Image (spheres, grey):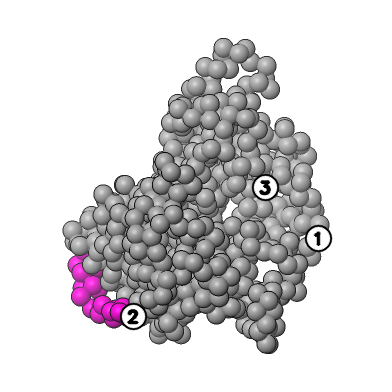
Amino acid sequence: MSSIIKIENFTFKYLNQSEAVLKNINLDIKRGEKVLIAGPSGSGKSTLGACFNGIIPFSKPGMISGKLTINGDEPYKKSIFENSRNVGTILQDQDNQFIGLTVGEDVSFSDENKAIEVEIMKKNTDQALEMVKISRFKDYSPQELSGGQKQSVSLASILRSSAEILLFDEPLANLDPKSGRDAMRLINEIHREYQKTIIIIEHRIEDVLEQDFDRVVIVDDGEIVANDTPKNLFRKDMFSKYGLREPLYIEALKYSGVDLETGSIYPLDKIATDENIENVKKWIESINMKKALSSEEILKVIDLEFSYDAENKILNKINFNLKKGEILGLLGNNGAGKSTLCKVIVGIEKATSGDITLLDKSIKELSIKRRGERIGFVMQNPNHMITQETLLQEVEFGLKIRGIKDSKKIAEKALEVCDLLSMKNWPVTALSYGQKKRLTIASILALDPEILILDEPTAAQDYKHYKEFMKFIKRLADKGVSIILITHDMHLALEYTDRAIVLCNGEIIAIDAPANILESSEIMEKSNLRETSLSEMGKIMGIDPALLMNSFINYEHKEEEKNV
């Protein structure tokens, strides 16, 4: 195959930075290949993608040396329009990509630019929508769609372009687990059907590598540190070496003593060898299960209902309790009612009926301010919470309002916990989305709440910050703070929650240990979630999936305790 992207000794430095973001990059991508570019936050992987499609230097100027060619063209010498003929890009935030007032108009935009006849344009649009299985939404506004549906619209629009290369920048970031799996399968179908060159920039290794890739390119500190097949990179332990999370089943094989260099490890359906199964069973037998939860109840939700009108209930007969020191996962697909439930608990929304008690006393009539003194709520979008100019001012703000002494000292401690202390005097506008998430968490932690509600706390965080933050959350729980985690991350639910609630269409369909929930295909299907690779590993090996998952999390927690 001939090369479609060729990079030779390529270096890029933003104008306002002293150090280069990309350093001496050499890479050759063949026509029709499917390549994953992975790396921790700040590694330079997204910057590399922006060099492919011409966003650099069009809207992000800087200094370039070396050479990068796409189909023989140098993108940094072309216009965005010219580059779009070679590279079709699907952004992480699809809302910034829509042009048409309806789905059909958006997909038709490329043909309109080419002055295609109306009847042919309609036929092309219908074909593209059919390919991504979203035809019934043709007359909808893109803003009415879910995250996964929006991504499908963006993909249909790109399919109508002549671009040979499709570039996806963190395509799973805003999708629930099942929508993420469906998106990866759809991208795989597009690759097979149209023979496009596919480049995906993502750090969620397990979810992405469920589908076949020709190669994985790992970027770290602006350099390419690995470029090989997924199987070879697993054997060389390259993902964990550079701060990327391996699939859970690979971690379990390592824990059980399977030799990655010689054993059968990839793909998942090939791991059930007699030797692997024996090693895993011996490992499970050696693990002691964790201690039981506290029985002290701190919060109770009783027959809670919420609706905006009489006809449509958003929450219906919600009943559950939260125990002291418990980490409770709140799972469900987009629109299931998770965030709404937590807004009702903290008083942002008022319950239609039912009650909420805190330490056996009803808080239904308490104001948001009074509830906020005891229940901290960190919203999913950090921009909805931040009001001050610098990081230190933001974390101090709530402390000063409450008249708390030593506000600076407390704020600095919270910033340190969230790995932001070195930036305390930075303007908030200089932070990435993930850093803003950590800032809002620091602001709430500084107030020392009895209950902490976190809405997608690890979204936009790389594995390093994910582990550091969740270890801290676990320490808080060990000290008696009760925590509710709203999450799409099945890994987080499995590893760090004591129990999990699954919401579907505003109703609770399951309350159980996370391992029991995640092994249930029926619950996963109904709630638009997905099994972890550990659950699938158990089924493939003939081992009880719940036992395997519980053994895995207990082993991990014991190893973490050793390293504290």
Image-based side of 543 in relation to 378, left or right: left
Q: Residues within 10 Å of mark 1 (few under 14, many from 20)?
A: few
**In percent of the image, x 18 and y 58: which residue is there?**
542
Mark 3 lies on residue: 50
Please tell me the numbered disc located at residue 296: 2
Q: Earlier in the sequence, mark 1 or mark 3?
A: 1
Q: CA–CA distance between discs 1 and 3?
A: 17 Å
Of helix, strand and loop, which one carries label 3? helix
Q: Earlier in the sequence, mark 2 or mark 1?
A: 1
**In percent of the image, x 65 and y 74: which residue is there?**
398
Residue 77 drawn at (x, y percent): 78, 39
Q: Do the residues under discs 3 and 2 have CB atoms within 8 angstroms? A: no
**In percent of the image, x 38 and y 60: which residue is there?**
354
Q: Do the residues under discs 1 and 3 have CB atoms within 8 angstroms? A: no
**Magenta-tinted stretch:** 276-296
Instruction: Evaluate whether residue 179 shows in this view.
Output: no
Q: Residues within 10 Å of mark 3 (few under 14, many from 20)?
A: many
Mark 1 lies on residue: 16
Determine if the magenta segment contains residue 288.
yes
Residue 409 drawn at (x, y percent): 67, 86
The kind of residue tagged 3 is Ala
The kind of residue tagged 1 is Asn
Residue 525 drawn at (x, y percent): 31, 47
Of helix, strand and loop, which one carries label 2? loop
Of helix, strand and loop, which one carries label 1? loop
Please tell me the numbered disc located at residue 255: none
Residue 122 drawn at (x, y percent): 55, 17
- Which of labels 2 and 1 is toward the front? 2
Determine if the magenta segment contains residue 83.
no
Asked where in the image residue 428 lies, by quadrant, the reply is: bottom right
The kind of residue tagged 2 is Glu
